[in-house]
Amino acid sequence: MREVLEGSQAVARTVARCRPGVVCAYPISPQTHIVEALSVMARTGELRDCEYVNVESEFSAMSVSIGASAAGSRAYTATASQGLLYMAEAVYNAAGMGLPIVMTVANRAVGAPINIWNDHSDAMAMRDSGWLQLYAADNQEAADLHVIAFAAAEELGIPAMVCMDGFVLTHATDVLELATQEQIDGFLPPYSPTQVLDIDRPTTIGTMAGPESFTETKYLQHLRFLDAADVVEAWSDRFTEAFGREAGGLAVRYDPDTLDRDRSAPPAGAEDLVVVAMGSVIGTLQEAIAPMRAEGLPVRLVGISAYRPFPREALKAALGESRHIVVIDRALELGSGGVLTGCVGRALAGTGSRIHSVVAGLGGRPILEGSLRDVIARALAGEQRGLEFLDLKTGGVPVPPVGATEVAR
């Protein structure tokens, strides 16, 4: 049944229907509505057979999640921004121990200066922590991706973040269709942990590893991550078959005329300009590109759904023969350029691609359709900078020279 819901409420209901055994909660904007809704469900009995744990910090939230998962429970938590950084030590520990915790990250800028609005700098700071990172383009995906995240994380033994843009999605209402309890029960296998702390069979998880074995443990983590792309894609395909709508995947190509998801191969010989982006800006790009397509301008849109593992082969397939790319980045590598741009550049090394980085929406600055159209038009005309800060207020601010950070492969 379709209903009007706030994004946070939709995520909370979906997480509850995934039957977590332990929910660890510490409030921080903009994810607070998620854990508040779960607390109400736990109190009223709608969320059954679950221990809802109020903790004193984000570090404790992840630490309790680690303990719960290691003891054999399906564990969930949520955080954002400084909270994610505060739990950083435990975030790495969860991955190193192979514990399939699922966490919602309501993406928010990291200070100083203090900022509570949206960009991707928080999750990007944890991009190499060993967690899956799935990014939602809208609130329907934000809810549905949690079902996929639990399934993929538990098959792989890798924790998973579902990233949804703070306020832009978490506090926005939309017409959504949530998976029912019966549907999720039929789709998500009962939790069957591969390692469990048991007083009758004592073991140690996360023990000391010296120089003689540390490289090998990281190599094994790396091998597991190489399997992750196929697993995430397989669960996304199963979700489509089971629920009749698409969610997740690796890299999503949008039909150039309807801008709906397109699972077909791009046209042979297509050399359009391709805009690559991640998160809720995809919706704004759809609105910006549609009239340009109607005018006959050769521009397409590809969305990254799985940032970790980074979908190199899926991205190449979505691009087809196009080698002129504009990446819309929501996080910045200081002194270098956009974070997503760097990953795209490495994926396309040796292909002769021209890749332009557009850093947009830092700290929640609005990303306007008109500004995106201007960027795309200049790129089509060959006038795009290598690195650009969208709608930068340049009064008294030095601007880098044209082409200073263009990624040319």
Image (cartoon, grey):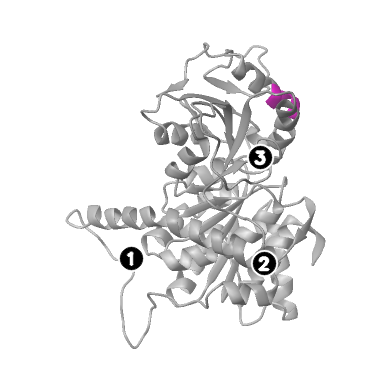
Labels 2 and 1: the sequence-earlier one:
2
Residue type at mark 3?
Answer: Ile
Quarter holding the C terminus is top left
State whether residue 312 appears in this view.
Answer: yes
Please tell me which residue is depicted at 45% across the width and 55% down the height of the picture.
131
Q: Position of residue 305 (x, y in %)?
A: 56, 48
Label 1: state its secondary structure: loop
Let me know if residue 367 is in the magenta part: yes
Residue at 76% in and 58% down: 176
For label 3, the crowd category at 10 Å Cα-Cα, with few meaning under 14, some 14 to 19 and many 20 or more, is many
Q: How many marks?
A: 3
For disc 2, the marked residue is 14
Marks 2 and 1, how far apart at CA: 31 Å
Disc 3/disc 2 C-alpha distance (Å): 23 Å
Give the side of residue 39 with respect to residue 131, left or right: right
Instruction: Please tell me which of labels 3 and 1 falls first in the chain.
Output: 1
Q: Which residue is mark 1?
A: 206
State the residue position of label 3.
Answer: 282
